Image (spheres, rainbow, N blue to C red):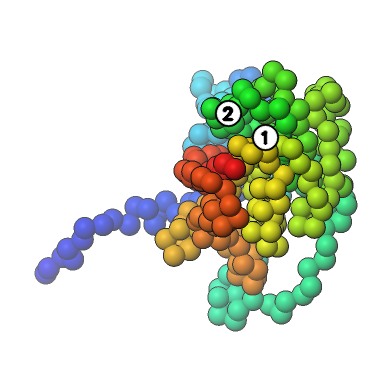
Amino acid sequence: MKLPELDVGYGELYKTIFTPVRCKLMLTGIELKVFNYLSEPVSAEEVAQTLDAHIGNMAVFLDGLTSVDLVRKEDGLYQNMPIAESFLVEGSQTYVGHMFTWMAAFDAPLDDMAKLVKEGPPPKQEAPPFSEEMLTRGVSMMVNTELAGDAQLAVKIVSNLPEFPSFKKMLDLGCGPGLIGMSIVDAHPDMKGVVFDLPPVVAVAEKYIKEFQMEGRVETLGGDFNQSPVGGGYDLVYTSNALQFAQDIDTVVKKVYDALNLGGVFVSVFGFGLTNEGTKPENLVLGSLSTALMGQGFGVEVGYIADSMLRVGFKSVRSRTLSTAWGPMELDMGRK
């Protein structure tokens, strides 16, 4: 008997089988608000009584959360690990559980993945425009993700620019709730800022400008950057993932170029760049798999933004890859 000669094991395949279980554990914890009650050490019985749940199965469930390092267990008591305490406890400024629940809902088509692969996407239907309610809900959800790391990253990128001390005015293009633009302005002693997005979105941003007492330094401008003017006289234009909505990338990037002062800097953080013939990065490919199977393309080739910057006239463009909570992202910086 000759045994097969192998230079690889199936361990990674075995681990893949349990990935949906890990996801279900976290989402169930979010749904039941379990993490809200684990900021201090507590027994499974106490949690079960608080949530009117089955004591035995609550213990099994909490052991599961412990196995995936969301919770620790010591002397029979359970407590959030730092990552769960920071991001999965409702009421925290950095709570992102609602975002994960929302994202998981988009993967419903994957339940019929075999059918989609065999038969192709369903007949295309005209996509309805985003309602004001949908925009407001989606943008409000972004507030915590920006406070949970996106704004801090933006401040680090911009404050390290050699031109930063000389900046007088900036634009946050596609600002969402506006916290990134506000944070960059707040990191500068006297720079003023404009946050730009669709009118229903800037209505949300105005609320946070008041909440964070930035009225004297940050103002709003509403419109669709594909058609609307974005103002001018900027030393810095910052955008984070908004350029995925550009109908013609060169038209929008040229609009940014024209809005900048001579010597101004355009900073783009973009998480939709594909590599390896459209198969990497993993988070982008898997995150967009359901929409792709439904016949909606997603993602562009890495270098998409940088190439456009060069085409429209930026005198120099520098690019690098950022490591973020969302996975690798492209950082492109064009100087006029």
Mark 2 is surrounded, within 10 Å at the Cα level, by few (under 14), some (14 to 19) or many (20 or more) other residues, namely some
Q: Is residue 217 above or below residue 304?
A: above
Q: Is residue 272 above or below residue 79?
A: below
Q: Horizontal and vertical percent for residue 116? A: 60, 75
Amino acid type at circle 1 is Asp
Relative side of 108 to 277, left or right:
right
Amino acid type at circle 2 is Glu
* Residue situated in front as seen by the camera: 40 or 181: 181
Relative side of 146 to 19, left or right:
right
Query: Dividing the image into 4 quarters, which one contains the C terminus?
Result: top right
**Marker disc for residue 235:** 1
The residue that appears at 64% across and 72% down in the rendered structure is: 295
Observer able to see residue 294: yes
The residue that appears at 83% across and 62% down in the rendered structure is: 129
Does the residue at mark 2 contact the one at mark 1 (Cβ under 8 Å)? yes
Mark 1 is surrounded, within 10 Å at the Cα level, by few (under 14), some (14 to 19) or many (20 or more) other residues, namely many
Instruction: Identify the image quadrant of residue 263.
Output: top right
The residue that disc 2 covers is 163
Q: Horizontal and vertical percent for residue 240? A: 64, 44
The residue that appears at 76% across and 53% down in the rendered structure is: 225
* Residue situated in front as seen by the camera: 7 or 271: 271
Kindly state the secondary structure of the residue where label 2 is placed. loop
Q: Is residue 140 above or below residue 209?
A: below
Kindly state the secondary structure of the residue where label 1 is placed. strand
The residue that appears at 60% across and 79% down in the rendered structure is: 120
Q: Is residue 202 above or below residue 226?
A: above
Q: Horizontal and vertical percent for residue 170? A: 71, 34
**Marker disc for residue 255:** none
> Which mark is first along the chain, 1 or 2?
2
